[in-house]
Image: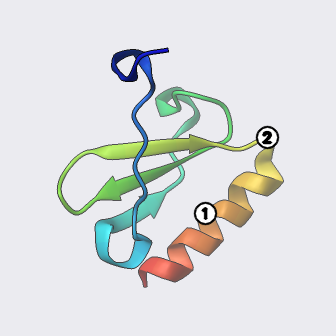
Amino acid sequence: MTRHNSPQTRKYHIPSEIRTVDLPDVDEQELPHSVRLFLKEGGTLQCACQNRSEQKEVFGVIRGCTS
């Protein structure tokens, strides 16, 4: 496999690169049970969780890191 076909990955330092985090409305979610992160440099990321309980836990952890 060539490097040209490999997926891009990037690590984010939550306290310095994430501006805020929220739970999108159901009709705004790209994937079920997602958490939306707003980047300080602009743009957003959505990460999907397996269920509502995990969504709330991930949201709480990331929110705690950004406040």
Tell me if mark 2 has few (under 14), some (14-19) or many (20+) residues whose alpha carbon lies within 10 angstroms of its own: few
With respect to residue 45, does 2 lie above or below? above
Q: Is 59 left or right of 15, judged from the image as shown?
A: right
Q: In the displayed image of the protein, which residue is found farthest to the left?
A: 41
| SS of the residue under disc 2 | loop
- Distance between mark 1 and mark 2 Cα atoms: 13 Å
**On residue 50, which mark appears?**
2
Q: Quadrant of the C terminus?
A: bottom left
**On residue 59, which mark appears?**
1
With respect to residue 59, does 8 lie above or below? above
The answer to whether the residues at label 1 and label 2 have Cβ atoms under 8 Å apart is no
| Res 38 quadrant in image | bottom left
Q: Is 15 left or right of 1, judged from the image as shown?
A: left
Q: Position of residue 26 (x, y in %)?
A: 58, 33
Say what amino acid the circle numbered 2 marks.
Gln
Measuring 41% from the left and 16% from the top, which residue is drawn there? 2
With respect to residue 51, does 16 lie above or below? below
| Res 18 quadrant in image | bottom left
Q: Position of residue 56 (x, y in %)?
A: 71, 60
Measuring 47% from the left and 31% from the top, which residue is drawn there? 28
With respect to residue 23, does 66 lie above or below? below
